[in-house]
Amino acid sequence: MSEPKNDADLPGRSIAAGPAGPAGPSGPSAPSTMTAAADPLPGIAEADRLIAAALADHVRMPAPARLRDQLAHRHLAPRRPWRAWIPAFALGAATAAAVALLVVRPAAPADVALLDEIVGDHLRIVSAPRPLDVETNDMHNVKPWFTGKLDFVPPVNFRGDDDFTLRGGSLAVFQGHKAAAFVYQRRLHTITLLVHADAAARPRSEITRRGFHVITRASGGFGMDLVSDLGWDDLRQLEARLGSASGEKE
Amino acid sequence: MLSRKPRPLAVVGRSDPAGPTAPADPGGSLPEQALAHVDELYGLARHLCATPSDAEDLVQETYARALGGVARLAAGSNLRAWLFRILRNCFIDQARRKKIVLEIADDTVADRPAHEVWDTAALDQLRYLAAADLERALATLSVELRFIVLLDAQGFHEAEIAEIARCAPGTVKSRLFRARARLRAALQEGQR
């Protein structure tokens, strides 16, 4: 229970309690009852004490078990030992090798106008005074924010991690239609993931435009374009994590 | 009124001159120590937000910022006060995003009862105060006054509240004084 604070020097209160209190207001934890006798309106100090006691009881509210579980799962989950990742790395390496054989880089360069638009959207986000419409590293807040603002649900589930922090999201316009921009951070680099609907299928391609690295791809009706001044390896890492999270439930 | 001045997303804890610097559980990791305060944070969030799910979202975002690398806790800082400050920042940001006006003035309740008399009968009613009456009284406070009076109820000292609310200790004193007077006025109004 909270101990009422000393408010003896507030307007209407006198600290000249004198003999009324055992020691007078001696510090932050001095109970306000010490000032009761000095109060020009009898009973006010006692009323304050009773209200403070009621508030102290009232403000304590156990967090729902679901919330506790979610927080514990998110923040206390033990890290997997590195050995557990060996099969995943092996599979990833094999997949990457197969993709490298199949995909000619750049296989089908997206047209220049499209690339300029992707880079332009990224520049607008990094250079705007208030770059993000929703600033949070919690995907639970970013995705719902787009509800009602887009006519599609962006298929993005990667919530960020220690390497790539989710910074938030923003509305963008891509080829005349509203698009979702998810913004991640890697060290000092900003990465924009543009997601737009009704995109004609196009193969994955890696292209450098005006010094920015761009990975474009469109499948399943969604265009997903990653753009950043980050190195290729890091950008591919993020792409892989986005891909692995896409099958997970949010 | 809550400050509308934009602040950086990162919240850096500072040494607290008055508050304890020892964590809730010195033996645990930072996430473990931080999660030990979830009930207190949820209790405050529940009184700031309109719905339980909003309160849960606010606590989720608070921990995401605190433990997700967005905010940093300086060495020797008061972890508990730091978490509450992040919660306050998150609450302001959420309100801004939802375009909610935070300052809610209720002119139907005077700042101080016109004829304030707390006799034995009136004090007895306070001893058996119903939660709904207390809620109604709290609802008459502006968000900032409610925030400060709830922090006071959580056991924070004025210096800690000043640190959390980013205002001077003198401001905390005067706001607490106003909040208490307003609560008394609202409760006395309810007794009639």
Image (cartoon, coloured by chain):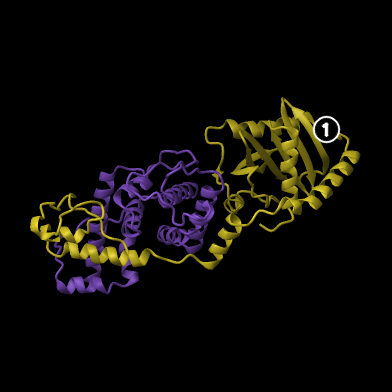
Chain colours: A yellow, B purple
Which of A111/A80 is in front?
Answer: A80
- From the viewer's perspective, is B105 left or right of B189? right
Which of B192/A103 is in front?
Answer: A103
Whether residue B135 is visible, yes or no, is no
Q: Is residue B121 above or below residue B107?
A: below
Whether residue A31 is visible, yes or no, is yes
Q: In this view, does B155 lie above or below B3?
A: below
* Among the 4 quarters of the image, the one containing residue A59: bottom left
- From the viewer's perspective, is A53 left or right of A39? right
Which of A16/B21 is in front?
Answer: B21
Amino acid type at circle 1 is Pro
Percent position of residue B13, x then y: 44, 43
Residue at image x 78%, y 48%? A221
Task: In the displayed orientation, state which residue is furthest to the top.
Answer: A210
Percent position of residue A206, x then y: 79, 34
Please, what secondary structure does the residue beneath circle 1 have? loop
Which quadrant is home to the C terminus of chain B?
bottom left
- From the viewer's perspective, is A242 left or right of A109? left
Task: In the displayed orientation, state which residue is furthest to the left.
Answer: A19
**Residue position marked by numbered label 1 in the rendering:** A109
Residue at image x 72%, y 32%? A231
Which of B95/A93 is in front?
Answer: A93
Chain that bears disc 1: A
Callout 1: 10 Å neighbours few (<14), some, many (20+)? Answer: some
What is the count of numbered marks?
1
Percent position of residue B17, x then y: 33, 44
Q: In this view, does A58 lie above or below B105?
A: below
